[in-house]
Amino acid sequence: MKFSVSNTRRQVGKLNIYRKAPPEQLAELHPADRLMVQLIEIDRLGPRVEGMLYKAAFEESWTMLDEVRILLSTQSCLLDTKMSRVLGGFRKPGRRS
């Protein structure tokens, strides 16, 4: 999975001058640009976001597999119950009830 958080290198280069800018100067930027300046300051942002996305996808997959396991065991129990009822109707010879 490839995930890109930042803009192009050219755009990052232009916003890089605002990394140490005072809040008054940052207030003049567009909100999206202010966000990008804050994102530029996060060390190793790309790998961190990729790790969070992987973890979320893994947990979602695990939950779905767990739900399938529960459904299959429920289905198995229901089939066993039906089969025991069907087979219970057949009596062994010589046995009285």
Image (cartoon, rainbow, N blue to C red):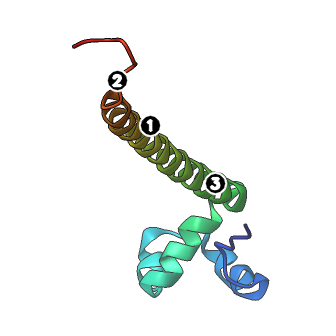
Residue beneath label 1, please?
Answer: 73
The label shown at residue 54 is 3
Query: Is 79 situated left or right of 50 in this image?
Result: left
Q: Residue at x 72, y 56 (%)?
A: 47
Q: Residue at x 43, y 82 (%)?
A: 31
Amino acid type indicated by mark 2 = Arg
Q: Residue at x 30, y 33 (%)?
A: 85
Using the numbered discs, state the Cα–Cα distance from disc 2 to disc 1 in whole angstroms. 28 Å
Amino acid type indicated by mark 1 = Ser
Query: Is 29 situated left or right of 94 in this image?
Result: right
Which quarter of the image is occupied by the N terminus? bottom right
Q: Which callout, 3 or 1, points at the residue further toward the start of the chain?
A: 3
Secondary structure, mark 3, is helix
Using the numbered discs, state the Cα–Cα distance from disc 3 to disc 1 in whole angstroms. 28 Å
Residue beneath label 2, please?
Answer: 91
Using the numbered discs, state the Cα–Cα distance from disc 3 to disc 2 in whole angstroms. 56 Å
Give the label, 2 or 1, closer to the camera: 2
Q: Which callout, 3 or 2, points at the residue further toward the start of the chain?
A: 3
Q: Residue at x 76, y 87 (%)?
A: 10
Secondary structure, mark 1, is helix
Q: Residue furthest right?
A: 9
Crowding near the residue tagged with mark 2, few <14, some 14–19, many ≥20 C-alpha atoms within 10 Å: few
Secondary structure, mark 2, is loop
Q: Is residue 6 above or below residue 93?
A: below
- The front one of 80 and 49 is 80
- The front one of 28 and 83 is 83
Q: Position of residue 30 (x, y in %)?
A: 45, 88
- The front one of 41 and 86 is 86
Which quarter of the image is occupied by the C terminus? top left
